[in-house]
Amino acid sequence: MTMAEGVLLVGASGLAREVLAAGITGVIGFLDDDPQLHGEDVGGVPVLGPVAEAATRTGQVLVCVGPSGARRDVVRRLDDLGMDSGRYATFVARSARVGVTSDIGAGSILLDGVVVTADVRVGWHVVVMPNSVITHDDVVADYATLTSGVALAGGVQVGEAAYLGMNAAVRQGVSIGAGATVGMGAVVLSDIPAEETWAGVPARRVGERS
């Protein structure tokens, strides 16, 4: 997947700097709601103004907000401002590998070393951090976040805005509910209900998402 020229990065965040480091091209600048950043450079890229300007400026838009729920909130704000959803860019790092039978939704970000194999469906505005592996027949819903080193076996379902911590591993055929959180290094062997937090080896419920 290639990037068209003229991309606005929404959120002058660590994730945005990782996207820059992974080789995105054609970046116009950042948009961020922190007024102290306006007029400054982040990673050599100027911060042009607040997030709302994405709806009126020209160019593609890539939302680089790390937390799943916050990323969804930003997209909904831009929808309410009338921004055309066709303007969302998709970024797949050059070192990432995506199988020819897999689909990556608009607004999604796949960083270095990510592997997506066969017949995978990745939704809109999903973030997949370095060296994660998504295998055959997995479905990753909109706004989900897979942090570094996550491994999904075949046929896994990851719900909307779910968050999987670093080096979590998920058994084949397991479903992770919308808004659920999986802790770092967890080994998930059974379904996780929506909005619950699980951690450990094997993973067990430790609370609910606030």
Image (cartoon, rainbow, N blue to C red):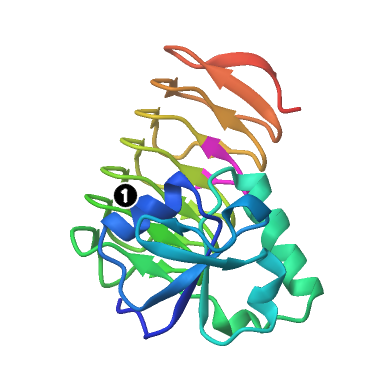
Instruction: Report the residue at 67% width, 46% height from top.
Output: 69
Q: Give 18 or 112, whichever is nearer the viewer.
A: 18
For residue 108, side relative to residue 154 (left or right): right
Q: How busy is the neighbourhood of tag 1: few (under 14 within 10 Å), some, or many (20 plus)?
A: many
Range covered by the magenta-colored residues: 157-163
Q: Position of residue 207 (x, y in %)?
A: 69, 16
Q: Give 202 or 208, whichever is nearer the viewer.
A: 208
Which quarter of the rendered picture does the N terminus lie within? bottom left
Q: How many marks?
A: 1
Q: Does residue 167 appear in the picture of this structure?
A: yes
| 184 relative to 105, above or below | above
Q: Splitting the image into 4 quarters, where does residue 49 fall? A: bottom right
Instruction: Report the residue at 47% width, 12% height from top.
Output: 200
Which quarter of the rendered picture does the C terminus lie within? top right
For residue 165, side relative to residue 43 (left or right): right
Q: Position of residue 169 (x, y in %)?
A: 37, 29
Q: Which residue matches tag 1?
A: 135
- Residue lying furthest right: 80
Q: Secondary structure at mark 1?
A: loop
**In the image, is residue 194 part of the stretch drawn in magenta?**
no
Instruction: Report the residue at 55% width, 63% height from top.
Output: 39
- Residue lying furthest left: 95
